[in-house]
Image (tube, helix red, strand yellow):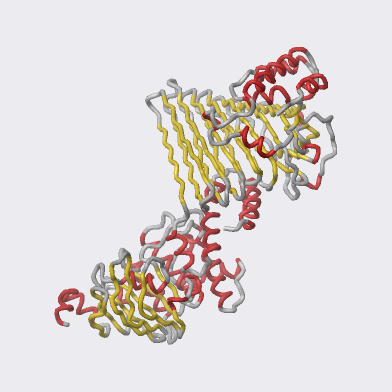
Amino acid sequence: MNFNFEEFQKSNFCFKELDNIRKKSFQNFEARGFPTKKQEHWKYTDLKNIVNNNFKNLQIFNDSKNLQYNNELLIKNYEHNKIILLNGNFIESDFNFEDEKKIKIKSLKSTFENKKDFDKIKDYFNDDQNSMISLNHAFATDGIILDIDDNYLFNKPLIVYNFFDKNAESKIINNKFFISIGEASNLCLVDFYRCEDNIKYFNNTIHNYTIKKNAILKKFSINDSLNNSYNYNSVKVKSYANSVFEVFLLSLGPNLIKNEIHCSLLENFSSCFINGIMLLNGIQHHELKTNVNHEYENCKSSQIIKSVLLDESKGTYQGKIYVDKSAQKTNGYQLSKALVLSDNSAFNSKPELEIYADDVKCSHGSTSGNIDENSIFYLMSRGLTRNLANKMIVKGFLDEVIETITDPTIKKFISEIFNERINKINL
Amino acid sequence: MLNIDNLSASIEGKKILKNFDLKIKPGEVHAIMGPNGSGKSTLANVLSGRKGYEIQGKVSYEGNDLLEIPIEERAQKGIFLAFQYPIEIPGVNTNNFLKTSLNAIRKYRGLKELDSLDFLKLVKEKSKSLKIDEKILSRQLNVGFSGGEKKKNEILQMTILEPKLTILDETDSGLDIDALRIVSDGVNALRDKKRSFLIITHYQRLLDYIKPDFVHVLVNGNIIKTGSGDLAQQLEKDGYEGVSAQK
């Protein structure tokens, strides 16, 4: 892999400090390259191998901003606010349903052009053992910075459209999202992905969220359309007192995705709920890694992940719960269940509990197996064909997680997307 | 309707049913009683098509070789098995399951499939007539149901699917008197000149509510005695051993 850093550096120069960060990050990436399975956290997703096998000549996306996106791809008949990105670049936003004075949105690009603005986020550019983060620091040129004032309750969800078009073909796109929810505010955020013409690209995104006191962030990540993309998403969350962070992950679409969610519960009574489903077929390879850090007492976390693997697909869930010695009265729960429905598919699960406090309630469970024959027999004895019985059981298995979504309009929205997909799948 | 001729069934090399014969005509209610391990459930399983048995002999249903008919087609052709232990299927809505089942059967019979509205109307009517709280239908299939609720759900399914041949596999075990009445009311309401029932039970109690035309005593894989409804009372009095000895 040869990325032309010098050319990128010249064409994107803003000021010396940023330039130095990029240079250092690029050197870090160059020294380590794409992660391989030799690294513990990448044991189940050998990214170097995957990139080498799937991209002949992967290049950094460094085109000038193109504002023309296909608005046919916008979701219709569903009232929502919008942020639109094309090939990782911020294009526009629309907060028509909201009090726009309470919402500040900027592009990362504009922040890079203003040293003062940059100073507010530069702590997020620290070096990381993870070379994908270094790669992102070195090459990210755009993304969004969204700040919600205190005491603001959104009327409608916000859909962040991540569009990719043919200019992204064989490119790696690096971008960053910064989202901060003010005290006692709340937001429903949907990350939605669409690409045109089945192009092959790599998207490497870092999300940094701050959820202040009494605030609620519900985030939904919808990767539904089958496509030829390769993705790495790292979400880092800081949760303050009494805040709630809820994630729902619908992992259906791309060839490859590794989602990482790191949530630090920093103050009293904050909570983090991560639920998700994977329904994979063909040669899809999806991984979810969650890392919940209980740094303070009385915090609560839970993860419920269900996966269904068909054909030659691979799924992985690595879930870690860390409980600091000061984090007494922690309540942690984790459950991973997988149905592995073909001989050539596989599911890896690695639960990890690291507990230093002595008054905690933490439990985890992990199962993988096939569909229960007794259940199939029961349904068939009521006149259903084996295919229909299988489908009903698999759908029910995954539906249980969709049922946990607490926002009713989004639950309906996600249910519809999921039903459409499962109806097409040959079980 | 059902002709079982010289049926033997083994599981894992162990012979459970041995040269078993039984004829059920349209409109008849047959009860099979027998001690634990006599082959009662095996009979129900073989008739409904459960895998895992080695089968010899002949079973014809409405003139067709039943053993050659796939499981779902047996249901479509009108055979219904009320399970001894109904299976819990998480995430599957009971209503939705039942509608899919009914429509699969209606489609096979060349009837128009019911839309959600007509289906709900039918379910309301049937559950009301059986005095079953229709709320169980909005829950996940059998998940967290009490023993009684599971059995009532089986009877409601039977009532809605209107099978020609119903096999009740120890539906009465574990039921209180009220639930027992719901089960028997369900069967009695469906009983007519064309429908047949095969009632497998341990106890005579259920047969106080559903009067069978024939009672068979199954011991060790074979029917050792056949009689009218009175035989059930005799069994209650003398036990299986007593009746076997009189043979």
A16 over B219 or under it: above or below: above
Q: Is residue B66 left or right of residue A8?
A: left
The answer, for residue A192, to whether it is visible in the render is no
Which quadrant of the structure image shows residue A367?
top left
Q: How many marks?
A: 0
Quick one: which residue is furthest to the top in this view?
A16
Residue B135, relative to residue B34: is it above or below?
above
Left or right placement of residue A13 versus residue A265 in this view: right
**Residue at 53%, 67% in the rendered image:** A385
Where residue B33 appears, x then y in whole percent? 27, 75
Name the quarter where the C terminus of chain A is drawn.
bottom right
A267 w.r.t. B218: above or below: above
Question: Which residue occupies the foreground of this view, A397 or A313?
Answer: A313
**Point 78% across, 35% down: residue:** A93
Locate residue A287, reporting x and y percent: 57, 38
Residue toward you, A411 or B2 = B2
Residue B64 image point, x, y percent:
46, 83
Q: Position of residue B195 (x, y in %)?
A: 43, 82
B38 to the left or right of A35: left
On-image quarter of the N terminus of chain A: top right
Judge left or right: residue A24 versus residue A309. right
Q: Residue at x 69, y 20 (%)?
A: A26
Q: Is residue B136 above or below residue A170?
A: below
Is residue A97 at all visible to an observer of this figure? yes
Picture residue at 44% right of the left edge, 81% below the top: B65
The image quadrant that residue A405 belongs to is top right
